[in-house]
Each structure stands twice: as C-alpha cells, then as structure tokens.
Amino acid sequence: MSHIAVLEKDSPSNDEDKKISHLGVAIITPDGTYPGEDEYRRVSGQEKIGAILKLAADALKITNTTDWIAKAGDRQLDPTRTFAEEKLSCVVDIEYHKHEGGGGA
Amino acid sequence: MHDALAKANFEADVAKLSDDAAARVGLEIQARTYPVLDLTVKHSRPLRLRLRCDFWDELPPAVELLNPDGTLLAPPHLGDIFNDGAHPSSGRPFICMRGTREYHTHSSHLNDRWDNYRGQDGMNIPGIAMQIARAWRRLTK
C-alpha cells in the first residue's frame, strides 16, 4: 500500500527556513499512529526527537512513557538528540513503545 | 469475565494497530479474530506469534512461538525473555516477559502479578506484541 504523506508546515517560510532540512515523521505506537494513518508530520531536522514523541503521546492520550523506547528500523534513537544528529532524513517511521521486561525464570 | 466483554476489549485494542501501520514497523498481521492476534515479525529470521487473548484483559495473552508457516518453533537458546525450557502449563518453550500469561503463571513470577501492569500505557495487545518483536530482533541479529 502506498503512503500519502500529508506534511504539515510547522513554521512560516523564510530564507533561513529554506537552509534547514526538513523531514516527514510518523510515530507508530500500540495506541495508534501520529499524526494519523498514512500521514507524516513535517519537522525540522534541528528539532529534538523527544519533542515530537511528546506530541504523539499527547495526541494519542498516552500519559506514561517513562520506560518507552523509540526506534527507526533496527536502530534505537536517543530522544534528547535532534533528527539531524540521529542522521534521519526524508521520510521516517518511528516505532515507539514500552521496553520489554522480565526473563530469568 | 464475560466472553462478550473480553471480545469487545480485544477488538478495541487490536484496532489501534492497523495492518498498514504494523507493516511499517515490520509486523505482518495474519489474523485478528477474537481471541487470537496472529502476526509475523519480519526479520532475517522471521518469527510468528499467536497471542491468545481469551479473558482479555483480566488475563494477559498466552503466546505461542511459531515458524512462519504456523508450525511450532523450536526456539534457539537466546536467553533474556525467550525461555527454551518447558513451561509447567504448556510444556513448551515460552516467552518470559511481563505481559504474557506464561510469565505471570510461572512459579518464579507468581509474586509479580499481571494486575501490576494491566491497563498501563503500552501494555495493551499491540504493545505486548511490539515488545516481543523488538526483543526477537535484538537477540537474533
């Protein structure tokens, strides 16, 4: 199935803005997908990943993400870093869910 | 627990992860008909999981480890949440992770009750499946 990217403009366009790379981001959680099915949010590469994860959690009414982890592909992301610092570009699906726990029986 | 309520709970939960969203995080949904969520973790070594969710969410899902064709998997020795020993109830290798019926009914974890996690964010049916999928990919790189 093809994805239709609905990229929301996050700030007014200006010369400085054009120098900053942007990307489309979707957050896929056990409680739904942000910003919506087949949609991507347009974000600046300089934005912290954690800020978008927070927006997603709020939109999906997820209140406790204390031990949640974010991944792009097989790579775990550091929410305190920016998308650019994590070398993310173009269109990215981020998987966001609770860390597994247990073991040792 | 009334079966109709468990079915309604199940259907509300599994509807939160569409087939398309699942595919985007490497999960292929085979079936989502109460009481079973059947899916395959896409990976260099794929894993099929069958989560039997009768009595959801009074009880956590019972999870079967399968080959992609649906036959029973003989799991490699991975450790962590993948226990290749025989579970006292099923006699089969099992997933020893909070949120699975096998974990909460194992004699080693009877003091860690499902009620400690029931209803928490991320502990719904798709959330439990996503946690298992992550662990499998991490341990079978």
Image (cartoon, grey):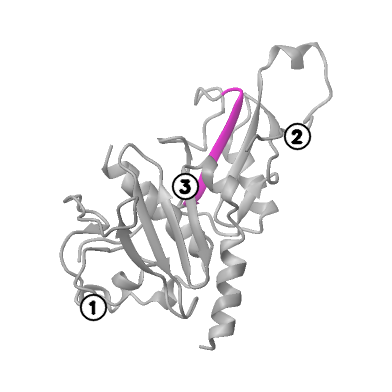
**Residue B97 falls left or right of residue B119:** left
Which of the two discs, 1 and 3, labels the residue nearer the N terminus? Answer: 3
Q: SS for tag 3?
A: strand
Q: Residues within 10 Å of mark 1 (few under 14, many from 20)?
A: few
- Amino acid type, mark 1: Ser
Q: Is residue A94 magenta?
A: yes
Read off the residue under disc 1.
B89
Residue A32, labelled with which disc? none
Read off the residue under disc 2.
A6
> Decide: marks 1, 3 in contact (CB < 8 A)?
no
Read off the residue under disc 3.
B27
Q: Position of residue B9 (x, y in %)?
A: 58, 74
**Residue B41 falls left or right of residue A33:** left
Q: SS for tag 2?
A: loop
Q: Position of residue A87 (x, y in %)?
A: 51, 22
First to last magenta residue range: A89-97
Give me the C-alpha separation between circle 2 and circle 3: 23 Å
Q: SS for tag 1?
A: loop
